[in-house]
Amino acid sequence: MQVIKRNGKITDFDQTKISNAISKANAEVKASERASAKEIQDIIEYIISLGKKRMLVEDIQDVIEEKLMEQQHYELAKKYIIYRYNRALVRKANTTDETILTLVKNSNKDVMEENSNKNAMQASTQRDLIAGEVSRDLTKRLLLPPDISKAHEDGILHFHDADYFVQPIFNCCLINIKDMLNNGTVMNGKLIEEPKSFQVACTITTQIIAAVASSQYGGQSVDIRHLGKYLRYSKEKFARQFREADPTLSQESLDKLVAKRLNDELSAGVQTIQYQINTLMTTNGQSPFVTLFLYLDKDDEYLEETAMIIEEILRQRLQGIKNEKGVYITPAFPKLIYVLDEFNSLNGGKYDYITKLACKCSAKRLYPDYISAKKMRENYEGNVFSPMGCRSFLSPWKDENGNYKFEGRFNQGVVSINLPQVAIVARGDEDKFWKLLDERLELCYKALMCRHEALKGTLSDTSPIHWQYGAIARLKKGEKIDKLLEGGYSTISLGYIGIYEMTKLMKGVSHTDPVGKEFALRVMKHLRAKTDEWKAKTGIGFGLYGTPAESLCYRFARIDKEKYGIIKDVTDKGYYTNSYHVDVREEIDAFEKLKFESQFQPISSGGCISYVEIPNLTNNIEAVEELVKYIYNGIQYAEFNTKSDYCHVCGYDGEIIINDDNEWECPQCHNKDHSKMNVTRRTCGYLGENFWNVGKTKEIKSRVLHL
């Protein structure tokens, strides 16, 4: 028999622990009340006779109490109960010790790999992670209702970002960079006035990003359109300077001089954004999790300047940034999102040349992601706007003048539901499935309201850059943020994992099968209806969010495998498929995948992104361009991955080798850092835990490394 401990770990049954516990209680009662050695052994043998493969430690202790009472050792049973309670208090007082020590010793794999923009080896990052573990512990034990904490531990739901819940801060946002640049802002008690040039505007923008990132736990998005104004400022300034220096200059000569100087300013400004974002460290020990929104809006007064800025951003991303060895690599941030519209969708439009550059960039650097303005307008009341840094979308909202507003809004937090687990427990019974789903959705609603209530009453002074100086609002000092939590101004998100596995369990087929698709769409519409119902009931901006939650896909699958064993095509893979995505093992081409998943995106309006994988992207620019055309006409939000081997240190795109030490190694630059390479899935496409086979020979059974 195995015993499931309180922390979820599994250990072999050890009867001596029962003997020791009862003996300690024996020592505290008079001799006539003590259990004899035979009575203790009878209790142990009864537990073994139950014939269970696994038992919870709490269940074993319950049996001991019952048996002591049956033996009429009432005083002893009382002492044992007190002993058990005291042990529980000790555990509560020391629940973070082990976790914090593993952080300091750099042996906590889950935390170290959780965020791509955090280096858990560094002292500044460790400080934030240690604080996060204390917050997680307080959240679990004291701040959340017991049923929510237990639901999180059992993998029924996932209460995201518990490591920040102890503080009144929110998730992601769209920075109102236009307001902050046009009307000035304040940082560290210093007034920052409107910039007079592009270079200064870029510097101030990165300072704003760093300040905002330091006082929230999610990502930030910045619309690049708002820098166009300042590129024109620089152009006008250079023209004045050259004209004043030489009034006899011809217009042609003046234009050439201005163009040269402006290009230098443009290059330097974009480089400032790229290098500062990649070298800045926020107060929580990480690079800002920032997204740049690259949108050519035909109604933009500064459209030509914006086109120049976007082209330069893509050009510099294509080149990459040098690492410590002087080799150009792909930086993780800023993330880039490029908007496809009628004049840049590779159909003979004026700005197709920028889109072709974006395709080259996608092929080499896997950025940018793509949004179809055409499809987005269909789904969001005619609007086009950036997702937040976490890739969640806001719901349309109008101000008191009837104008749509997106920048300066935010997400309060996320709770995700484990859909495969609902289906596992239902065992194919649809009536049971729907009843259980609604019960668990009510738990999710309760957990989301905990997030909302935790933010209520927050004063603007907690983060002046957000609430007082324009990133979100211009509230007064001491003013509460409550009005920004209501009426749909901000959103709060229900996430979901595993539509594929859920459908497989309930219908025996994938959701790409017509029977499976009908069921999957019914579930999706039910989830959406619930968030709409909650929004109508509370006035809070609930949304359905298909998040790219890679680590959560593994967590839910791991929990369910431990609880329910190996289930074919479900827990046997070691991961669940993210949101509504097609399972990676299905034979489906990129166009069909996008076409299929596009049906789910309008339902999942609080957040949606689809991925397609193309082998050897660098040699398939034409394929990328064809897919980009398809995205514009067929799906709102998509990005590319590659199946080919690829080294991000030197750009090598041949086969990554296995060296004599049984490690992956780039044959060109000898990079061995797995986080900086893609390796094609060998043999079977297994995506579970990485391991070496017995004997550590050169043969690899399933060594999977991917970004």
Image (cartoon, rainbow, N blue to C red):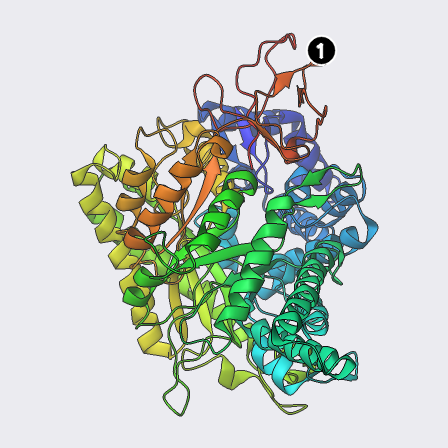
Q: Position of residue 328 (x, y in %)?
A: 70, 40
Res 161 seen here: no
User: For the point 76% across and 80% down, which residue is it?
Assistant: 246
- Tag 1: residue type? Asp
Q: Nearer the viewer, residue 672 or 20?
A: 672
Q: Which residue is mark 1?
A: 660
Res 529 seen here: yes
Q: Nearer the viewer, residue 391 or 225?
A: 225
Image check: 476 left or right of 613? right
User: For the point 30% across and 32% down, which residue is it?
Assistant: 588
Q: Is residue 191 above or below residue 622?
A: below
Q: Position of residue 691 (x, y in %)?
A: 59, 21
**Quick one: SS at disc 1?**
loop
Q: Report the residue that reaches farthest toward the right.
A: 123
Q: Position of residue 360 (x, y in %)?
A: 50, 43
Image-quadrant location for residue 11: top right
